[in-house]
Image (cartoon, helix red, strand yellow):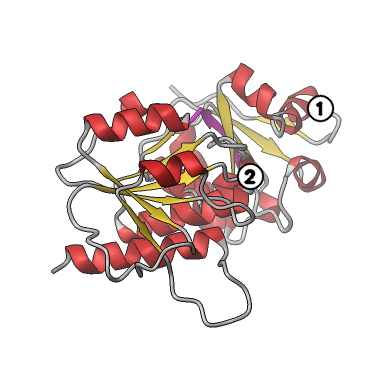
Amino acid sequence: MPSRPDLEITSPANPRLKQVVGLRRRRARDDAGVTVVEGFEELGLALDAGVRPRTLFYAPELMLDADTQLGVVDDVRASGVETIRVSRSAFEKVAYREGPDGFLALVPAVRAGLADLELPAAPLLLVCEGLEKPGNLGAMLRTADAAGVDAVIAVDPVTDWGNPNVVRGSKGTVFSVAVASATLDETLEWLGANGIRLIATTPDTETLHTEADLTGGVAIAVGTEKFGLTDEALRAAEVRVRIPMSGQVNSLNASVAAAIVVYEAVRQRAG
């Protein structure tokens, strides 16, 4: 049976596009149970991770290689997903990033509960406490994906995993890395129940990150750039570690600090 022709939208004032713009607000995303994924690369990673979009909006005029990339649209449509063609001007109004490449999808909200995590023996986890910048959270996901981190836990997060800027900052790795959100108390209880040691990063310790044992089941905790980890998190940690600093500032970008300690753990665990 031939597929039904796509709906085509040419007006930026179209109600369907207004709904997409509304999803920039967290409450709207939570109510709809969806996340917005913009970008061909990000969409491809989500599809590879088994994500099935609810709707795909596409603008051939903005595609970098329409002859090839329209094949992805055909594949998504063939799987039963609604695909909607959008004019260049209308797509540029709904896009949330500069230089859009003609792909925007609505996908189911990211599952983010501690109970949903499936961990191997002796897992390596990254815990991010109170991070307020979606870009930092996204960058940590890219590090986690590259380093083979088993899960990233957002503790008392200010932003959500479905924030479009988290998806963008992660380059779509929010769909390839297991994630969860929880309170600090919930996280500490869960770590204890699973025999996972908490490693706190802080400048207020003499132990370098290269001196601590980061093998076995560990969760590396990073706090905000301004305040660091909370006192409660620091007290709960088995070990506190610092990254050596020789300049005038006493802290790094949170995502950079996380990457340095995570890769030290990877080095140690490789023997």
- Disc on res. 87: none
Residue nearest the viewer, comparing 147 with 216: 216
The magenta-colored residue range is 104-110
**Image height of 211 relative to 65, above or below:** below
Three-letter residue code for mark 1: Asn
Residue nearest the viewer, comparing 251 with 5: 251
Q: Which quadrant, please, contains the C terminus?
A: bottom left
Residue 208: x %, y % from top left: 35, 70
Q: Which quadrant, please, contains the N terminus?
A: top left
Residue nearest the viewer, comparing 150 with 265: 265
The residue positioned 68% from the left and 23% from the top of the image is: 28
* Total count of labels: 2
**Image height of 68 relative to 267, above or below:** above
Residue 176: x %, y % from top left: 38, 45
Left or right of 190: which side holds 56? right
Q: Secondary structure at mark 1?
A: loop
Residue 112 appears anywhere in the view: no
The quadrant where residue 22 appears: top right
* Residue 236 lies in the magenta-colored region: no
The quadrant where residue 252 appears: bottom right
Which secondary structure dominates the residues rendered in magenta?
Answer: strand
Which residue is label 2 attached to? 132
The residue positioned 71% from the left and 34% from the top of the image is: 24
Q: Secondary structure at mark 2?
A: loop
Three-letter residue code for mark 2: Glu
Residue 119: x %, y % from top left: 22, 38
The residue positioned 81% from the left and 27% from the top of the image is: 14
Which residue is label 1 attached to? 14
**Image height of 51 relative to 141, above or below:** above
